[in-house]
Image (cartoon, rainbow, N blue to C red):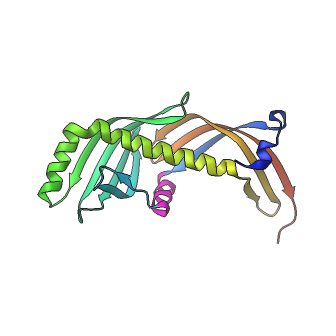
Amino acid sequence: MNEDVQDFDPQDCSALQVEILIDESWIDRFLAERQIAIPIDEKTHLTNLRINLAGGLLNVQADITEKEGSSVELSVRPWWDASNQVLNIEDLNINTKSKNILVKSAGWFTQHFLNSRLDKKIEEKANGLFKTQIEKIKAGPVNFPIPKAGNAQVSVKEITVNELIFVDHAIRVKATIDGYWKLNLMISE
């Protein structure tokens, strides 16, 4: 955690309500840069994740790394549990695409028998990424450039996601950020 933030008296921090709209193209770039892999079992991983958000559903397309030319499409209904600060998923639907008969059989088996295990793995991965990003922000400070005027800097003490809604082609987040703000105004060329 950021040592400067730890030294703040809670009275020195201020709460800021923010609303963030995260476009699915930004999420795709984020996933590609981090080369996220979701383990299905010890030998099988989903990689090259791409998403589509529509009608409250999160649709994920991914390659099955160990089976060349094979891919999977997952559709889930995610919902945010604000009291526990975790993402939950429901209504997992899986479709596999492959010329490999073993992969097709595994897809049918997964669809009918492993859904509850797979949705837990996806939840764990998503919540792990969320916690990692929050810790990086808290390790801050975070700088926001102000064009031709300087920058704003915040040392984050805590972030609480109050609402997370999946809308068409984006995720809308409402959060409370407790932190200490510094504003540096200067002429930049």
Q: Residue furthest bottom?
A: 189
Q: Residue furthest top?
A: 83
Where residue 68 appears, as percent x and y from the top left, is: 24, 66
Residue beneath the point at 32% across and 43% down: 75
State yes or no: residue 74 in magenta.
no
- Report which quarter residue 89 is drawn in: top left
Residue beneath the point at 79% across and 58% down: 151
State yes or no: residue 26 in magenta.
yes
Vertically, is 111 above or below 70? above
Where residue 20 appears, as percent x and y from the top left, is: 60, 44
Q: Quick check: 30 left or right of 111?
A: right
Q: Nearer the viewer, residue 132 or 96?
A: 132
Q: Residue furthest left?
A: 101
Where residue 10 appears, as percent x and y from the top left, is: 80, 34
Q: Nearer the viewer, residue 169 or 42?
A: 42
Q: Nearer the viewer, residue 186 or 90?
A: 90
Look at the image and give the residue range highlighted in magenta: 24-34
Q: Nearer the viewer, residue 165 or 63?
A: 63
Where residue 72 appears, as percent x and y from the top left, is: 27, 53
- Report which quarter residue 5 is drawn in: top right
Residue beneath the point at 84% across and 37% down: 12
Q: Quick check: 123 left or right of 41?
A: right
Vertically, is 186 above or below 172? below
Q: Residue furthest front?
A: 42
Q: Quadrant of the C terminus?
A: bottom right
Residue beneath the point at 31% across and 59% down: 63
Secondary structure mostly taken by the magenta-highlighted segment of the chain: helix
